[in-house]
């Protein structure tokens, strides 16, 4: 064989091995369930995790508690619980302001422990009042239609 033919044979052999490896890899890779019912070949499955609930501006305190946990709301605060994962997030609001709610879903609790009849107003997407709570009150609420919590000095 001449040198030119040897290079051609080597190149063809190299291409065949690359193509064979490329064809075999996805077929032999273990399928992974992505959480949506379909299978994916490869090593990483996309995780489906809902974003944690937050507010803007930030609440005075925000922390997670396990399922079934009862958290006492301190005097002077409006507290809210939002279900998340296998537990809930607890928010403690202290200052008069309108707080935008992000990723608040499910049924939770609103607890108004402000003093002097100050209201906790739960507002819809257009800013209109849907619910108003004067202290002392602890009640369940569906967070789905609620987009804002507004703490005000005036009563309902």
Image (cartoon, rainbow, N blue to C red):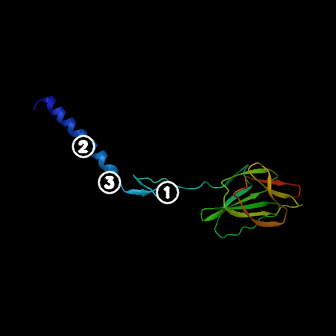
Residue 7 image position (x, y, % from top left): 18, 32
Viewer-nearest residue: 90 or 85: 85
Foreground mark, 2 or 1?
1
Cα–Cα gap, marks 3 and 1: 22 Å
Cα–Cα gap, marks 2 and 1: 35 Å
State the residue position of label 3.
28
Say which quarter of the image contains residue 3.
top left
Residue 145 image position (x, y, % from top left): 72, 56
Horizontal side of 48 relative to 104 (left or right) equals: left
Q: Are marks 3 and 2 in contact (CB under 8 Å)?
A: no
Q: Which residue: 32% across, 54% down?
A: 28
Q: Which residue: 44% across, 56% down?
A: 38
State the residue position of label 2.
17
Horizontal side of 128 relative to 116 (left or right) equals: left
Quadrant position of the N terminus in the picture? top left
Up-down relation of residue 71 to residue 9 (above or below):
below
Viewer-nearest residue: 60 or 153: 153
Which of the two labelled residues, at mark 3 and mark 1, occupies the earlier sequence position? 3
Q: Which mark is residue 82?
A: none
Count residues near mark 1 (Cα–Cα under 10 Å), then give few for <14, some for 14-19, many for 20+.
few
Foreground mark, 3 or 1?
1
Horizontal side of 46 relative to 85 (left or right) equals: left
Helix, strand or loop at label 2? It is helix
Which of the two labelled residues, at mark 3 and mark 2, occupies the earlier sequence position? 2
Which of the two labelled residues, at mark 2 and mark 1, occupies the earlier sequence position? 2
Residue 19 image position (x, y, % from top left): 28, 42
Say which quarter of the image contains residue 79.
bottom right
State the residue position of label 1.
36
Count residues near mark 2 (Cα–Cα under 10 Å), then give few for <14, some for 14-19, many for 20+.
few
């Amino acid at each position: 064989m001449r040198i030119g033919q040897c290079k051609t044979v080597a190149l063809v052999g190299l291409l065949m091995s690359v193509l064979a490896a490329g064809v075999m890899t996805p077929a032999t890779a273990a399928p992974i369930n992505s959480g949506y019912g379909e299978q994916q070949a490869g090593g990483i499955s996309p995780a489906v995790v809902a974003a944690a609930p937050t507010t803007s501006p930030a609440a005075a305190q925000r922390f997670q508690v396990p399922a079934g946990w009862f958290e006492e709301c301190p005097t002077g605060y409006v507290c809210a619980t939002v279900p998340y994962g296998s537990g809930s997030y607890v928010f403690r609001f202290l200052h008069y302001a309108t707080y935008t709610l992000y990723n608040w879903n499910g049924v939770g609790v609103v607890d108004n422990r402000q003093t002097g009849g100050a209201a906790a107003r739960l507002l819809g997407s257009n800013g209109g009042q849907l619910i108003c709570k004067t202290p002392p009150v602890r009640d369940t609420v569906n967070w789905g239609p609620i987009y804002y919590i507004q703490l005000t000095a005036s009563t309902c």
